[in-house]
Image (cartoon, rainbow, N blue to C red):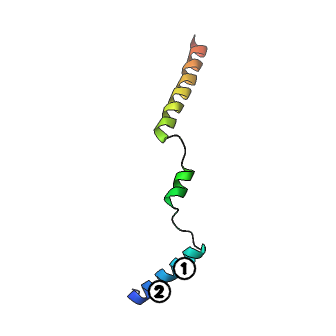
């Protein structure tokens, strides 16, 4: 098990590398929000349900009527 000194030293090394941009770090909240879709997942699901359901009903109507 590493000693407290070794842990502090490794943490300092990681912090210095992260500041220099050499190690990937957890993205900031602003970066995560920038990558987020403008439409929520449930709304996208509802739209897909309506569109795909409508197409299926039309295909069934064309085939069987």
Distance from the alpha carbon under mark 1 to that under mark 2:
11 Å
Residue position for label 2: 9
Sequence-first disc among 1 and 2 = 2
Residue depicted at 49% across the width and 58% down the height: 29
Q: Could you say which quadrant of the image residue 37 lies in? A: top right
Residue 61 drawn above or below residue 26: above
Labels 1, 2: front one: 1
Residue depicted at 56% across the width and 52% down the height: 34
Residue 6 drawn above or below residue 35: below
Secondary structure at badge 2 equals: helix
Report the number of discs: 2
State which quarter of the image contains the C terminus: top right
Residue position for label 1: 16
Residue 10 drawn above or below residue 63: below
Residue depicted at 52% across the width and 40% down the height: 39
Residue 13 in sight in this render: yes
State which quarter of the image contains the N terminus: bottom left
- Residue 25 image offset from top left, x and y in percent: 53, 68
- Residue 2 image offset from top left, x and y in percent: 41, 86
* Residue at the farthest top position: 65
Residue 3 in sight in this render: no
Mark identifier at residue 3: none
Q: Could you say which quadrant of the image residue 31 lies in? A: bottom right
Residue depicted at 54% across the width and 79% down the height: 16
- Residue 19 image offset from top left, x and y in percent: 56, 75
Q: Nearer the viewer, residue 58 or 22?
A: 22
């Amino acid at each position: 098990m590493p000693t407290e000194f070794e842990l502090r030293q490794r943490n300092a090394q990681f912090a210095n590398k992260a500041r220099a941009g050499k190690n990937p770090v957890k993205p900031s909240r602003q970066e995560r929000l920038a990558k987020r879709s403008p439409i929520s997942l449930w709304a996208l699901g509802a739209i897909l349900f309506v569109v795909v359901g409508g197409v299926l009903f039309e295909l069934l109507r064309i085939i069987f009527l």
